[in-house]
C-alpha cells in the first residue's frame, strides 16, 4: 500500500494594511486566564501534576516519539546571538536548549499566562542571563526588542478560537519586512490511515476541546491579513503535526 507523502506547501499572497496593535499588558500577580483554569487546571496549574508532567519523557510520549525532530527543526532556525520570542513555557528541557542556542550574546524572551509555568521557566533559566520570563498573555505581549524568530510550540491547539486569532495577529505584528520569521509547531489533520488519528480524536473529545479546529482550519486563516505574508507549511508523521513558517513580504 502506498501512503501519501509528507508535504511542504508554500503559500503566496498579496499585501494588505497592517493590523493595529492592542495595548500590551502583563497579567496580574497570580492571575490565570479563565479558559486555562476551566480546561487545563490539572495539566498546567495544579502543582502536583505540573511536577509530574514537566519531564522530557512525558513530552516524548505525548508526541509519539516525534518531539526531537520537531524541536530540532525549531532549534535549527535559531542563529547564535539571535533574539527569540517563545510564546509559552514547554515541559521538558526545550527552553534550556533555546537559551543555549542563542548563547550569552543573544536573547530569549519567554512569556506564559500561568504563574506556575512562569516559575518553572525561571527556575530552568536561572543560569541563563540572556533569558527573560514574563507572566503575560501571548495575545497581547510585546517583547522588549525585535525578534529574529518567534515560536509557538504547541500553543494554538490549547486556546479558544478568538484567542487563536489574537495570538496569530500579535505574532505577525512583530515580524519585520526586513527580516525575522515566525514558526508555528502544532497539530494538523492526520491522514485517515494513521492510527494516531483515532487516539487523538478521543483525546480531543475529553481533554483538548480547542484542538480540533486545527484539523479543519489553516493557521493562516487566523490572520486578519494573511496576504501580507509568505506561508510555508510542512507536515509530519502522516499529517499529525504541522510546522508553519511565516515571513512578512518585502515592502
Image (tube, grey):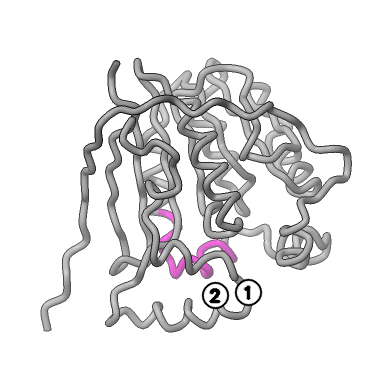
Q: Tell me if mark 2 has few (under 14), some (14-19) or many (20+) residues whose alpha carbon lies within 10 angstroms of its own.
A: some
Farthest residue to the right: give it. Answer: 29
Q: Which residue is mark 2?
A: 204
Q: Residue at x 48, y 76 (%)?
A: 200
Majority secondary structure in the magenta region: helix
Judged left or right of residue 168, residue 110 is right
Residue 199 spot, x, y in % from top left: 47, 82
Quarter of the image where one finds residue 232? top left
Q: Residues within 10 Å of mark 1 (few under 14, many from 20)?
A: some
- Measuring from the top left, give residue 18's x and y in whole percent: 44, 25
Q: Does 143 appear above or below 113?
A: above
* Residue 6 horizontal/vertical position (percent): 21, 61
Q: Is 244 left or right of 62, judged from the image as shown?
A: left
The magenta stretch is 57-68
Whether residue 208 appears in magenta in the rendering, the answer is: no
Q: Is 162 drawn above or below residue 96 in the view shown?
A: below
Q: Residue 247 in the image: x percent, y percent?
A: 34, 31
Name the residue tied to disc 1. 207
Q: Residue furthest front?
A: 17
Q: Residue at 77% of width from left, 56% of height from top?
A: 34
Distance (Cα) linking label 1 and label 2? 5 Å
Q: Name the residue rendered at 54%, 26% in the picture.
A: 20
Q: Nearer the viewer, residue 217 or 174?
A: 217
Please check the rendered image and state whether residue 66 is part of the magenta-colored stretch, yes or no.
yes
Relative placement, left or right, of 195 versus 57 is left
Amino acid at each position: 500500500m502506498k501512503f501519501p507523502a509528507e508535504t511542504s506547501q508554500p503559500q503566496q499572497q498579496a499585501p494588505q494594511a497592517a493590523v493595529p496593535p492592542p495595548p500590551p499588558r502583563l497579567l496580574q500577580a497570580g492571575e490565570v486566564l479563565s479558559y486555562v483554569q476551566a480546561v487545563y487546571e490539572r495539566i498546567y496549574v495544579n502543582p502536583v501534576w505540573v511536577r509530574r508532567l514537566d519531564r522530557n519523557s512525558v513530552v516524548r510520549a505525548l508526541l509519539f516519539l516525534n518531539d526531537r525532530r520537531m524541536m530540532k527543526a525549531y532549534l535549527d532556525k535559531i542563529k547564535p546571538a539571535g533574539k527569540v520570542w517563545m510564546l509559552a513555557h514547554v515541559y521538558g528541557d526545550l527552553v534550556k536548549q533555546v537559551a543555549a542556542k542563542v548563547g550569552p550574546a543573544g536573547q530569549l524572551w519567554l512569556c506564559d499566562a500561568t504563574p506556575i509555568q512562569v516559575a518553572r521557566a525561571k527556575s530552568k533559566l536561572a543560569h541563563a542571563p540572556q533569558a527573560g520570563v514574563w507572566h503575560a498573555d501571548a495575545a497581547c505581549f510585546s517583547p522588549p526588542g525585535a525578534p529574529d524568530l518567534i515560536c509557538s510550540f504547541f500553543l494554538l491547539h490549547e486556546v479558544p478560537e478568538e484567542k487563536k486569532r489574537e495570538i496569530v495577529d500579535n505574532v505577525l505584528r512583530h515580524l519585520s519586512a526586513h527580516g525575522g520569521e515566525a514558526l508555528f509547531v502544532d497539530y494538523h489533520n492526520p491522514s485517515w490511515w494513521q492510527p494516531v488519528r483515532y487516539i487523538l480524536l478521543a483525546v480531543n473529545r475529553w481533554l483538548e476541546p480547542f484542538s480540533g479546529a486545527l484539523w479543519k482550519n489553516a493557521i493562516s486563516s487566523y490572520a486578519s491579513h494573511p496576504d501580507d505574508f509568505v506561508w510555508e507549511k510542512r507536515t509530519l508523521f502522516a499529517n499529525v503535526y504541522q510546522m508553519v513558517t511565516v515571513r512578512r513580504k518585502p515592502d
